[in-house]
Amino acid sequence: MTDQGAGEATADPRWDVVVVGGGPAGLSAALNLVRARRRVLLVDSNRPRNSATLLSHGYLTRDGISPLELRKLGREEFLAYEEGEHWQTMATSISRGDDGFVVDCEFRGQQRRALADVVLVATGLQETLPAIDGLRAFYGTFVHSCIECDGYGKRDQALAVIGEHPDLAERALLLSQWSDDLVVFTHGSGDAVTESEEAQLASRGIRVDRRPIASLQGGREGLTGVELEGGEVVPREGGFVRPAWAGKLEYVAPLGADLDADGLLVVDDHGRTSVPGLYAAGESTAPGPQQLIVAAGSGARVAAVINRDLIGGLDELGDRVQ
C-alpha cells in the first residue's frame, strides 16, 4: 500500500493490527497478517540492532545478504498488499483506548497516533558493548556477537572471546567448533569464568586471560591483537564479544504487561502476553538475540494466532474436534 514518513497524516486511522518493529519477526508477522486480509500498520524507524553487521547468514535463500537489504525486501513484499502500510517512526507509548489500543509515535519531532484492535510487539533488543577502546570500530566486521551467524566466516582464525557474563565459557566451547585457536578475555571480571570452567576450557586448549583489556589493535586491514592493561598485545585475527542485552519496551509500560527477570515480555506458547490483545514475537520475548530465520518463524507463528483470535470462536470448535 504505502510507505510513509512521519508527519504526512493528521487523522488517527484505525487498523486491525499494529505491528511495532520491522525486523524479521515483525515483517514476517505483518506479511502473513496482510495476506489474511487484515488491515496492518507496520511501525518501524529502520534503525536495527544489527545495522553494524555487513552480512547476515543462515537465512534460507538469503545467505550473505545485508540485514538492511533483507528488511527492505521484506517491506516491499508487505507493501505490495493494499491492506498494508508502513510508518517510518517510533512507538513512544501504547495505551488502552475506548475500544482497543492507542499507539503514539514520534520521529524527528513529528508525532502520529494510530488506533488498533490488537498490537504485536516485535522491537527486539538493544545491546551495550563492553567499554573497550576500539571495539566499536571492529564490531560487525572483524568482531561479532552471534556465533551461529558468523562463526563460519571466522573459521580457522586466531580468535578472541570477550565478555563479562557467566555464559562466556559456554560461548567459547561453542566457538571451538570453528577454531582451535581461542583466547577468552574476561576484561577484569572475576565472575565471567569459574575455576572449574577454566579447567574445562584448558582441557580443550582454550586459554583464559582475566586481565582488563586496554584496546583492540588493528586498522582497515583488520584486527591484529588485543592489548591488555600493562601493554602486552595478544595477537588475534578476529573475535566474538558478548554484549549486554535489554528489551526496548519502555513504550509498553502503560499497559502493565508482565515482564520476566530479563525485562522481556512474558508470553504463552502462542505469543499472547498478560494483556488481552497484546502479543509479542521474536527477541522481545527471548533472552539473547535470535537468528533471523528463527525470529521470522516466530512472527509467522504469532500472526496465525492473532488472525484466529480476531475471528473468534475457533478455539471452541477446536476443542470439539479433539
Image: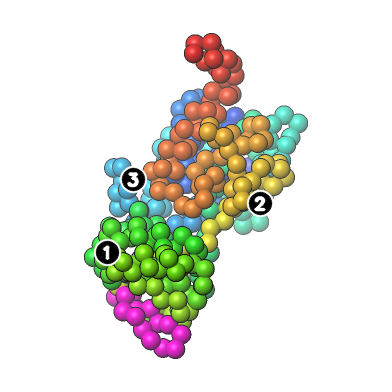
Instruction: Work out whether 31 lies above or below 67.
Output: above
Q: Within 10 angstroms of label 3, few (less than 14), some, or many (20 or more) residues?
A: some
Q: Residue 141: image x %, image y %?
A: 35, 66
Identify the residue at horizontal 38%, vertical 68% (top origin). 199
- Secondary structure mostly seen in magenta is strand
Q: Which residue is mark 1?
A: 179
Q: How many C-alpha atoms fall within 10 Å of the one at disc 1: few (<14), some, or many (≥20)?
A: some
Q: Quadrant of residue 172?
A: bottom left
Q: Residue furthest right?
A: 98
Q: How many marks?
A: 3
What amino acid is at disc 1?
A: Ser
Disc 1 or disc 3, which is closer to the eye?
A: 1
In this rendering, would 201 be left or right of 276?
Answer: left
Q: Which mark is residue 13?
A: none
Decide: few, some or many residues near mark 2? Use Cα within 10 Å; few <14, some 14-19, many ≥20.
Answer: few
Direction left: furthest residue = 156
| Disc 2/disc 3 C-alpha distance (Å) | 30 Å
- Distance, label 1 to label 3, CA atoms, is 23 Å
State the image coordinates of residue 149 (x, y, percent, origin top left): 35, 54
Determine the residue positioned at 48% across, 79% down: 212
Label 2 element class:
helix
Whether 310 is drawn above or below 219: the answer is above
Please give the name of the residue rendered at 30% of the width and 52% of the height, measured from the top-left corner: 64
Marks 2 and 3, the one that precedes in the sequence: 3
Query: Which residues make up the magenta segment?
Result: 221-236
Q: Which mark is residue 250?
A: 2
**Residue 270 in the image: above or below residue 253:** above
Q: Residue at x 31, y 75 (%)?
A: 236
The figure's colour scheme reads rainbow
Give me the disc on residue 59.
Answer: 3
Give amino acid for label 2.
Answer: Glu
Comes first in the chain, label 2 or label 1: 1
